[in-house]
Image: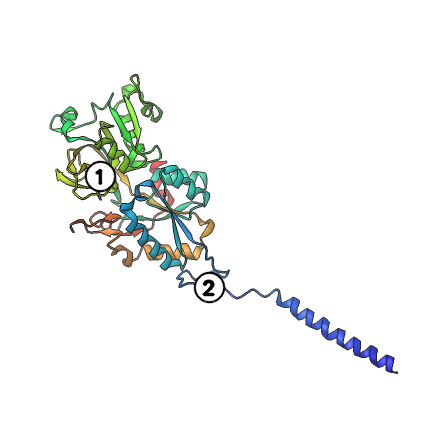
Amino acid sequence: MRKNKGSKGIAAILLVAIMALGMVGCGTNTPPASNNQGNSNAEGNNTTTNISPIIVTWYPNESSNTHEGVRTEISRLIEQATGRKVEHKLTTDYTIAIEAIASGSADIAMAMGAVGYIEAKNRNPQVDVLFVNSDKNGKLDEAKYFSWLCVALENAAAYKSGNTYSIDNIKGKKISFVSNSSTSGFKVPASSIIEHFPADQLDEDKLIEGGRNNFFNEVYFGGSHQGSAVNLLNGSAEVAAFCDTELLPYIELKSGEDNTIGAVYTVRAGADAPFDQYAGYDFIVIAAKPVFNGPNAYNPKNLSEAEIKAIRDLFTSEEVSSNEILFYDADIEGAIGLYKKSSSYGYVLTSDSWYDPYR
């Protein structure tokens, strides 16, 4: 009898143990509580919050010390939108930034050009437009900046054509471009030169082959718009391609009308290095062509849909359009930012197809 009672007791204990194990097993199928950290506006993601830093890459143009305040402000805004910290990937070459956003080693690429963006999207179709800076009315109608071909003012007479200036006499000269991935620093001026000299049967390859028997005597690539301008200022190049927006922190209009042929600009006193050694140097625009404002792009590899929406919502808000670091008032002496308020009201959304003319 005792033996039977003991057997029943053992069976009861085993039954309780099995039930307990079953409860533990069921518990392992319950999703863990969300590990939310930081003050994130990017809600709606049911998975554990991604707390890795968001990597923002920049072309060499905005990797300079001059744009440190701009980069810091971009960090603050992205963190405000997502709750995630931001790290910057600065570059010395366009291809580094393009490859970073295409590969996903960077999550956002700020202030790209149309051509660089298209190159990145060709490598990775997941890359897309995040937002773009608008025209002065907050629209896309006139959302453009300008590609310039410039020469030293002291040599301007050689490019005079009647009452204006032209590129008729640039053949055989020493020229500086930005990068062969630059929209306004190579693709647009190269297209203009090819069109202007049909008898020479030019293409892009022929334009970058310097030498006595080629179209240009010598060809330089500055690596950035600032670098191309410096090649003109220091005399390495006789003609240089660069855009208006990247030079604005260092120059001021001396005569003529902004972004028109014949406009004369001078390097402002107190400009950041390396322009500080060229203060007072004058150059003149001999060709100017409008270019669609470049996109800010993203790779969704490390960004959730909710985070992308939160970033877009914040950056296209009135809060950011009134941000004086990103959109500055050029009438205030010494004001430096990313875009002149008189040219860009703020950021707006656009689609990939808006850049089809550059494909």
Classify mark 1: residues with Cα within 10 Å, few (<14), some (14-19) or many (20+): many
Most extreme residue toward the top is 213
344 relative position to 112: left or right: left
Residue 232 in view in this figure = yes
The nearer-to-camera label among 2 and 1 is 1
- Pointer 2 and pointer 1: residues touching (CB < 8 Å)? no
Classify 357 as above or below 76. Answer: above
Q: Residue at x 45, y 39 (%)?
A: 123
Q: Residue 47, image x and y in percent?
A: 51, 60
Q: What secondary structure is marked by label 1?
A: helix
Q: Residue 125, image x and y in percent?
A: 45, 42
Q: Which residue is mark 2?
A: 36
Earlier sequence position, callout 2 versus callout 1 = 2
Amino acid marked by disc 1: Phe
Most extreme residue toward the front is 277
Quarter of the image with the C terminus is top left
Question: Looking at this view, is 92 or 262 the one in front?
Answer: 92
Quarter of the image with the N terminus is bottom right
Q: Which residue is mark 1?
A: 275
Q: Residue 25, image x and y in percent?
A: 66, 66
For residue 232, which quarter of the picture? top left
